[in-house]
Image: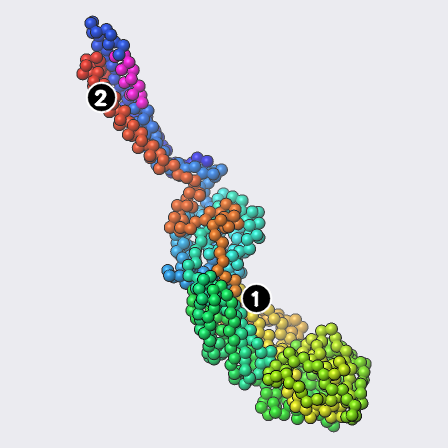
Amino acid sequence: MFQFLNPSILFALSAAVIPIIIHLLNKKKFKEVHFSTIHFLKEMVRKEMRRLRLRQWLLLLLRTLIIILLVLAFARPTLSERNNPLAGRAATEIVIILDNSLSLNSLELTGNLLEQVRQIWFQMEPLFQLNDRISVILGIEPVKILAQREYFSTELWQKIAKEIQPGSMKGNLNLASLKSFEIFQASELPNKELYIVSDFQKRGIKSDELEELTRRMAGDIKTFLIPVFHENDENISIDSVNVLNRLIEKNQTLKIEANLKNHHQKKYLNSMVSLVLNGNRVAQQNLNIPSDSKKSVYFETLLQSTGHVKGFIESENDALLEDNRYYFNLFIPEQIKIMHLVPSATFDSYLLDILKPVIDRKIFLYENMYLSDWSAIQLSQYDIIVLEGFDAIPEGFMNRLEQYQRTGKPIFVIPGSNLSLSNFNKFLKRIKLGQILSLEGQIEMPDKFVPMGKVDWAHPIFEGLFDERQQLNPIHFFSYYRIKPDSDNQAVINLENGNILLLEGAGLSYLIACPLNPAWSDILVRGLVVPLIYRIIYYSVTRTFDTREIVEIGGSFSRIFPEVGAPFQFNLKRPSGLESKISPIFKGSDVLLQHEDNTEPGNYLIEQGDEILYVYSVNHSQDESVQEYYFAEQMESIYDGGIWITDSEKLAEQVELSRYGRELWPYLLGLVLLLLLTELLLGYTSSRKQKDLMNQGLIEISQTS
């Protein structure tokens, strides 16, 4: 389509009549001079006069064309594919997607890439006019809208510029593009333009989905793709951290594994990697990683604190600082509160003697009560219930124990010596801890026994218990209960005949196959009994605390806290120290706590009153460290008909070209220059020929009126 960018000057085309008027006003008539004796020159003179008149008409045409072409050149004619030649001056719906994801924080020689994004933002300002509507979307997950359908103004541009700040979020151009197409669909304006400023990292683009989306939605939308390029790729990222201990205890060795990757394609990179716990740097190692490779580093340190431990692994500064830290947390209870329930005051129990060393060290806080007191016991204040010596359990107490286990707390069951199988199995079924089939063997028959058999040494309760999986002194069982496990139960220790000695339930409750009584076995006089009972209790309790929840930045936190009592005032403390309230959602006696705005890496604390209820960690997305990018050919294919603009200095020129087509004025001026030269040459030769004829006396010139 042919159109003019400056049509107002076309009125000057009327100046094209000036050469015609001048020609008519100065029209000259050639008069032949007759010679009586030179009649043979007559024909030659006529020919020359016709040539002169033709040259005058050519000069008139040239001068008229020169004026017309000059006016057209100043009117800026263009060739465009637009259907509407007036659309270029109409209001435009503009959507600008700015990528400020974590990868754009990469440090280059000229500063970080986000500074380049900010510079491009200012270079775009002259492209728009006051009646254009502007929407600005950050190409991150979740999508953030900085402006929506606001009319262009310098004030708007300055306001948005202040909001282009470094971020740690994951890039997602699919979500941003979807939002932009929704804005375009709701627009009544004739022109629609989409600008995307990004590094076009592959992990932030689902190409097949985006290509299908643009194919369905783009229509007559002009899309401009403005890349920012990474030059410094010397980057090591920390991709994950694992706490290797499955049983975490105070004054014991804590083992940490960190997994790092060198993203440079050619160089070995070195980094000093540190372990920090509760703000203290407790260990360091130097790591040398081959190009484009992963490597793990292992730390061991003595854990000397209790409560919530907040930690991170840190590597040295490189091109991308934000992936040089990875946060984690763990919990070590200061004391474990044990409720030991026995049938009566006359019941002989050895449990207190077994646990006395850890009770004296105040690791366990031990209380002992009797069945007659069960209705008065506030079970929720205890971390574990140990039921020992019961032959039957009252229905009401059974209900309370089931509810207690539903809150995520464990029960350790040591059966009585004269079980009511129907009653006891009903209880075991309700806490999902297998079934007792029968009594085997005879008590107080030391000459008839079954030795302890297979042990699952890989189970966490045995972690670090022995330097080697040595042969234990034989442990003999004279009598025991035959146990049938549920499908989600696990046998931790078996007898030699295959019967289960120690069963672990799905909720980390435990059932042992015989009473802790010397008439039933000789385990009480073996060295295994003290660490075994201690580990069963400690692991089952700490496992319920030790969730080590990791949330990817931008993701949401949601957790149900069972049986939470007053006060119902919950506060969230972000890593920066900013605090906000969390409104609880009550589900019966449980409380659901949620938090969506996890936009800052670090450890988040949820407080109930003055106490820390929970800690979760938020970390960067591994995808943001991967140095894989789309370039012109791929992106122009994904955004069908998109225009890839690598030189931001020529941004305005290329956008104007796309909007209005190719301008023809340079060609018109070149043609004017050529015509001027032709006019000068033709005018000079015509004038000279005319003078020659006059000098020869062959013609005379008279002025016509």
Where's the C terminus, which quadrant? top left
As rendered, which of 169 and 458 lies closer to the eye?
A: 458
Seen in the picture, residue 23 relative to 199 is either above or below; the reply is above
Q: Amino acid at mark 1?
A: Ser
Instruction: Give the main secondary structure, helix, strand or loop, of the magenta stretch.
Output: helix
User: Where does the magenta region start and end?
Assistant: 45-58
Is 594 left, or right, of 76 in this rendering? right
Q: Residues within 10 Å of mark 1 (few under 14, many from 20)?
A: some
The image shows residue 518 at horizontal and vertical percentages of: 73, 93
Select label 2 or label 1 by which is in front. Answer: 2
Residue in view at x 46 percent, y 76 percent: 285
Furthest toward the top, the residue is 36
Disc 1 element: loop
Assign a secondary structure to mark 2: helix
Image location (x, y in percent) of residue 615: 55, 75
Q: Please name the residue that numbered disc 2 is placed on.
A: 688
Q: On residue 556, which mark appears?
A: 1
Point 67% across, 73% down: residue:
588
For the image, the number of numbered tags is 2
